[in-house]
Amino acid sequence: MLNLVLFGPPGAGKGTQSHKLIEKYGLIHLSTGDLLRGEISQGTELGLEAKKLMDEGVLVPDAVVIGMISNKLDANKDAKGFIFDGFPRTVAQAIALDELLESKSSTISGMIALEVDDMELERRLLLRGKDSGRPDDANPEVIRKRIKEYNDKTAPVAEFYKNQNKFTSVNGIGSKDEIFDSIETVAEAL
Ligand code: B4P
């Protein structure tokens, strides 16, 4: 199985590059951001709770996203592999993911991190906010909060995978195809 974690700050291009990886390798895409937005659009209790936090630019509780991922792994038992996009976002989520995969005799093949500076992140998210309808993209203050959440709670997840020798970073600035070429080189070596 090829199980990739696509990592990076908000707006780094995780979703964009995930779609290219799915086309190439036929993996199942597990984006916790998309799953949460799905819950919001269906008006579920979980969605209502998550919306408040997401609109403020803060992370939703670990137990919520871990439960969603666990359900998706169970629902895709015959998958060739998974792309984890936007998950794990805390060390507790990374530990839980290792345990979930181990219980299925599987493991993470590697983490690929997209490196993009804060100014470019803010530019991309504000641009997307013009027509995405996402409240968390429209407001510079919320975007800065999301970047701060990333630096405080998510950046340490890279160390977790470095300690397992599973971490590689690529330059996330350039054309989408150029960035995909770099990701592909890493994925081919796994
Ligand atoms: P996510 O939905 O995961 O969103 P993201 O970090 O904003 O985006 P991504 O990096 O995928 O960027 P994209 O490709 O779209 O999270 C939203 C919220 O959900 C979080 O703040 C949190 O509250 C919650 N959440 C999600 N997962 C969670 C978890 N595990 N635990 C707790 N809470 C969680 O690209 C962004 C823009 O850049 C696009 O417009 C794209 O077209 C553009 N772009 C991409 N590549 C480019 C390039 N090379 N050049 C120029 N522009 C580019």
Image (cartoon, rainbow, N blue to C red):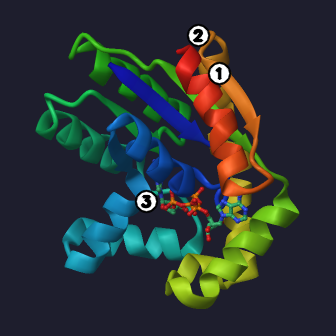
Image height of 134 relative to 75, above or below: below
> Where does residue 138 sit, x and y in percent of width and height?
64, 85
Q: Is residue 187 above or below residue 106?
A: below
**Residue at 72%, 58% in the rendered image:** 147
Q: Amino acid at mark 1?
A: Phe
Point out the image quarter for the N terminus: top left
Three-letter amino acid code at the position of disc 2: Gln
User: Callout 1: helix, strand or loop?
Assistant: strand
Dividing the picture into quarters, in which one does residue 141 lie? bottom right
Q: Which residue is mark 3?
A: 33
Nearer to us in this view, 56 or 157: 157
**CB of mark 2 within 8 Å of CB of mark 1?**
yes
Sequence-wise first label, 3 or 2: 3
Is 163 left, or right, of 133 in this rendering?
Answer: right
- Residue named by callout 2: 164
Q: Quadrant of residue 50?
A: bottom left
**Label at residue 52:** none
The local secondary structure at tag 3 comes to helix
Residue 97, quarter of picture: top left
For ligand 1, tell me if the residue under mark 3 lies within 8 Å. yes
Could you tell whether 120 is left or right of 29 in the image? right
Decide if ligand 1 comes within 8 Å of the CB at mark 1: no
Q: Along the polypeptide, which appears first: circle 3 or circle 1?
A: 3
Query: Pointer 1: what residue?
Result: 167
Specify whether 104 is left or right of 8: left
Residue drawn 39% across and 44% down? 22
Q: Label 1 crowding class (10 Å Cα cut-off): few <14, some 14-19, many 20+?
A: some
